[in-house]
Image (cartoon, grey):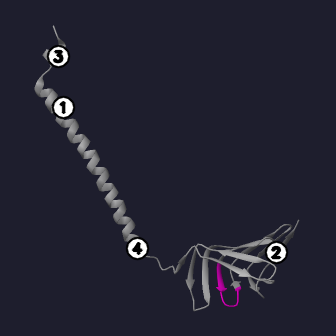
């Protein structure tokens, strides 16, 4: 005798309905989760950063020093406070620090936070620095450690 003739048709119907309901619940719950994520993203709103990922350069006759940071805020018309992962990079050296005041008009930069200067054979750890004369001169402040290779 055929096995399928002994299966209860009501049982099959309820099983199929249960599968469909389970499938619909899974689909709608994922849509609701996606809506919650989008709402959370929109609640974050605007930050108090004027410039995100700013990029500048100090130009002089012999070289360029490129400046990048994670965020920046205007202090006044010419000065910008660069924060978080501030990098100065040229062909000869690089400087890393957390906060720098960059003057766009004078093309100078000052920092009073821990800084790391790296060159081919030199590393300088300092409590701050001042870049002036369009990048031709750098003065290091505070406790400074010089490592020569």
Q: Where 40 falls versus 112 (above or below)?
A: above
Q: Earlier in the sequence, mark 1 or mark 3?
A: 3
Q: Earlier in the sequence, mark 2 or mark 4?
A: 4
Q: Which residues are magenta?
A: 99-108
The image's mark for residue 145 is 2
For this view, does 46 lie left or right of residue 74? left
Query: Is mark 4 in CB contact (under 8 Å) with mark 1?
Result: no
Q: Residue furthest right?
A: 149
| Membership of 95 in magenta stretch | no
| Membership of 102 in magenta stretch | yes
Residue 46 x, y percent position in the rendering: 43, 76
Query: Is mark 2 in CB contact (under 8 Å) with mark 1?
Result: no
Asked if residue 140 shows in the view, the reply is no
Between marks 1 and 3, how big is the CA–CA gap?
15 Å
Which quadrant is the N terminus positioned in?
A: top left
Q: Residues within 10 Å of mark 2 (few under 14, many from 20)?
A: few
The image's mark for residue 4 is 3
Query: Is mark 2 in CB contact (under 8 Å) with mark 3?
Result: no
**Which residue in the structure is indicated by mark 4?**
45
Query: Is mark 4 in CB contact (under 8 Å) with mark 3?
Result: no
Q: Earlier in the sequence, mark 4 or mark 3?
A: 3
Considering the numbered disc 1 on the image, is that residue within a helix, a strand or a loop?
A: helix
**Which residue in the structure is indicated by mark 1?**
15
Q: Residue furthest front?
A: 61
Asked if residue 62 shows in the view, the reply is yes
Query: Is mark 1 in CB contact (under 8 Å) with mark 3?
Result: no
Q: Earlier in the sequence, mark 2 or mark 1?
A: 1
| Residue 108 picture quarter | bottom right
Q: Residue at x 33, y 55 (%)?
A: 33
Q: Earlier in the sequence, mark 2 or mark 3?
A: 3
Q: Where 6 falls versus 142 (above or below)?
A: above
């Amino acid at each position: 005798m055929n096995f399928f003739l002994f299966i209860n048709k009501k049982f099959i119907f309820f099983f199929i309905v249960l599968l469909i309901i389970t499938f619909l619940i899974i689909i709608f719950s994922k849509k609701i989760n996606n809506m919650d994520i989008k709402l959370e993203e929109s609640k974050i709103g605007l930050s108090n950063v004027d410039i995100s990922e700013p990029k500048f350069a100090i130009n002089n006759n012999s070289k360029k020093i490129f400046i990048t940071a994670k965020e920046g805020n205007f202090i006044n018309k010419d000065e910008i406070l660069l924060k978080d992962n501030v990098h100065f990079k040229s062909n000869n050296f690089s400087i890393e620090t957390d906060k720098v005041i960059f003057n766009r008009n004078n093309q100078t930069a000052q920092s009073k936070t821990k800084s790391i200067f790296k060159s081919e054979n030199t590393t300088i750890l300092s409590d701050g620095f001042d870049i002036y004369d369009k990048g031709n001169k750098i003065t290091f402040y505070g406790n400074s450690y010089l490592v020569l290779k």
